[in-house]
């Protein structure tokens, strides 16, 4: 009996001035046990030696050189449109993958046909027994977080289980699902675009499976943090609420949503001298001003909904 043909996985790596990180990432992909995958690096107008490095040392990698920086969302979308795989795996450039990473993602998506996305287990690059994400969570107060973040990986997160989402730095999607719910929203540019996509997936009835043996080591905040991250987190948190949070649940939990945003603003005001705190407040203001733009998209998303409040509440953290 012939073995089934392994389905093609397209690994998409967005890159912006990441020449110092790419060798570790790409060398780890060369060690993958999964036999059928392609690697696409979408270069967001880097000004360092990224493109020269890729051309010289990694001829197997397909490089899409963009003339301008489209951010994470825009760059990944370009890669997805160019990809040939049945599964789309996103990977940050500041990572190192376990040799069985792709094999485990492919196993999970084959074993759980109701899963539209599969979340990797992310550990810290420099402290390899500490978690950065065991899947992402979304709270009823409208904030997102990483499951297990900063905790010792002591076996509590070693089982396949359903979660809300996977971190966009190491997650796999079914191409068929993306064809139905759409790609990343480029208005988000950077941060929480993966949460927005996960909301659309969950509303449309696609689940997310956490795959504990699909392990990736991440240099946390090596390629995007501080002031920039604070601004986009502040803005995009509000945009996800306006765009994706179902009205039936929002009517129940709006006091918690308002309380969370008030608490975040107050904490930022107390730390006003810090540039990141001021950026978070600017982000919140930009989020409020952008609500009409998100509401214009909301109706189409909510019309895709196929799941009950009870199912969604089972996913949300209180």
Image (tube, grey):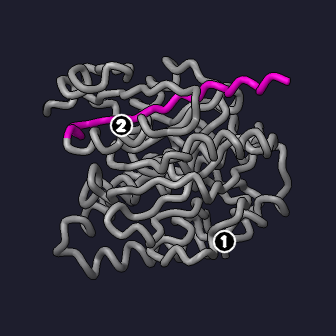
**Furthest-front residue in this view:** 1
Q: Marks 2 and 1, how far apart in space? A: 35 Å
Q: Which residues are magenta?
A: 1-19
Residue 295 visible? The answer is no
In the figure, residue 147 lies in which quadrant?
bottom right
> Relative to residue 12, is residue 118 depicted above or below?
below
> Relative to residue 76, is residue 92 depicted above or below?
below
**Who's the residue at 59% across and 60% down the image?**
135
**For the residue carrying disc 2, how many other residues have a C-alpha within 10 Å: few (<14), some (14-19), or many (20+)?**
many
Q: Quadrant of the N terminus?
A: top right
Residue assigned mark 2: 26
**Who's the residue at 84% across and 43% down the image?**
306
Q: Quadrant of the C terminus?
A: bottom right
**Who's the residue at 52% across and 21% down the image?**
83
Kind of element beneath mark 2? helix
Q: Position of residue 35 (x, y in %)?
A: 58, 29
Q: Position of residue 7 (x, y in %)?
A: 67, 26
Predominant SS of the magenta segment? loop
Check residue 22 for magenta coloring. Answer: no
**Furthest-bottom residue in this view:** 270
> Relative to residue 243, is residue 281 depicted above or below?
below
Of mark 2 and mark 1, the one earlier in the sequence is 2
Q: Which of 38 and 165 lies nearest the eye of the viewer? A: 38
Kind of element beneath mark 1? loop
**Who's the residue at 38% across and 21% down the image?**
60
Is residue 162 left or right of 227 when viewed as pictured?
A: right
In the figure, residue 144 lies in which quadrant?
bottom right
Residue 317 - label: 1
In the figure, residue 69 lies in which quadrant?
top left
């Amino acid at each position: 009996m012939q073995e089934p043909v392994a389905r093609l996985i397209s690994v998409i790596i967005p890159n912006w001035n990441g020449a110092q990180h790419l060798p570790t990432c790409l060398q780890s992909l060369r060690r993958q046990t999964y036999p059928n995958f392609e690697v696409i690096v979408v270069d967001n107008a880097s000004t360092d030696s990224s493109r020269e490095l890729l051309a010289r040392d990694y001829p197997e990698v397909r490089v899409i050189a963009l003339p301008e920086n489209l951010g994470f969302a825009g760059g990944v979308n370009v890669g997805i449109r160019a990809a040939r795989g049945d599964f789309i795996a996103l990977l940050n450039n500041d990572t190192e993958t376990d040799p069985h990473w792709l094999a485990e993602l492919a196993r999970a998506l084959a074993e759980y046909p109701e899963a539209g996305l599969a979340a990797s287990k992310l550990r810290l690059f420099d402290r390899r027994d500490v978690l950065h994400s065991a899947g992402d969570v979304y709270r009823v107060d409208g904030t997102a977080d990483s499951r297990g973040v900063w905790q010792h990986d002591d076996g509590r997160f070693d089982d396949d289980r359903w979660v809300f989402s996977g971190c966009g730095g190491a997650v796999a999607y079914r191409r068929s699902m993306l064809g139905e719910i759409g790609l990343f929203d480029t208005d988000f540019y950077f941060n929480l675009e993966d949460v927005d996509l996960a909301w659309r997936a969950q509303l449309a009835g696609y689940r997310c499976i956490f795959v504990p043996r699909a392990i990736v080591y991440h240099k946390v905040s090596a390629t995007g943090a501080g002031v920039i991250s604070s601004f986009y987190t502040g803005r995009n948190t509000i945009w996800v609420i306006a765009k994706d949070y179902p009205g039936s649940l929002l009517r129940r939990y709006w006091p918690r949503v308002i309380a969370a945003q008030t608490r975040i603003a107050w904490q930022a005001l107390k730390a006003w001298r810090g540039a990141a705190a001021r950026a978070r407040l600017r982000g919140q203001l930009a989020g409020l001003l952008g609500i009409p733009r998100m509401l214009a998209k909301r109706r189409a998303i909510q019309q895709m909904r196929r799941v009950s409040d009870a199912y969604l509440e089972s996913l949300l953290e209180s």
